[in-house]
Amino acid sequence: MISVSQILKNKNNEIYSVTPVTTVYDAIKLMGEKNIGALPVLENGILCGIFSERDYARKIVLLNRKSQETPISEIMTSTVITIGPADTLDLCMEIMSSKKIRHLPVVNDNKLVGIISIGDVVTAIIESQKETINHLQNYITQ
């Protein structure tokens, strides 16, 4: 079974994050520049929340708030569901599906080491299935 650490190996090692005092506007700008859908919120290096496009749509746009004046701390999701590097792809899929979330921060020894998205999970599944199909084809043709 594929582990989270294997997924992280195939990703860019850089972790983009914001602090609780970062404005929503600056966070959205960073997300646009880096083409990402969520940002972990770190305070003194410790994960204290997560901010996603969904948070922006539901807590800024729909409530007619000003993104330039609103700090992330006011709208971030502060109860963050995390996974560890040794966790499996099956667990990630189960969590993402049952909790209806698209991003999972990866924490090891209370330190953020990465973040995986539903896209990362789908890509890993497709690659695993391709590998299985190739093995089966090679077995059949031998």
Image: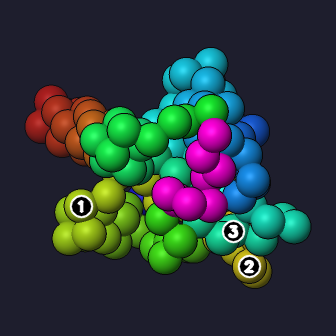
**Residue under the image location 73 percent in, 46 percent down:** 22
Quadrant housing the C terminus: top left
Q: What crowding class fits label 1: few (fewer than 14 Cα within 10 Å), some (14-19), or many (20 or more)? A: few
User: Mark 1 or 2, which is nearer the eye?
Assistant: 1
User: From what the image shows, is residue 32 above or below residue 98?
Assistant: above
- The local secondary structure at tag 2 comes to loop
Between 43 and 11, which is closer to the camera in this rendering?
43
Q: Is residue 71 left or right of residue 132?
A: right
Looking at the rendered structure, the kind of residue marked 1 is Lys
**Residue under the image location 61 percent in, 25 percent down:** 29
- The answer for how far apart the CA atoms under marks 3 and 2 are is 8 Å
Q: Which residue range is magenta in the image?
A: 69-76
State which tag comes first along the sequence, 3 or 2: 3
Residue 11: quarter of image: top right
State which tag comes first along the sequence, 1 or 2: 1
**Outermost residue, bottom direction?**
109
Q: Which residue is mark 2?
A: 110
Q: What crowding class fits label 3: few (fewer than 14 Cα within 10 Å), some (14-19), or many (20 or more)? A: many
Q: Which residue is mark 3?
A: 47
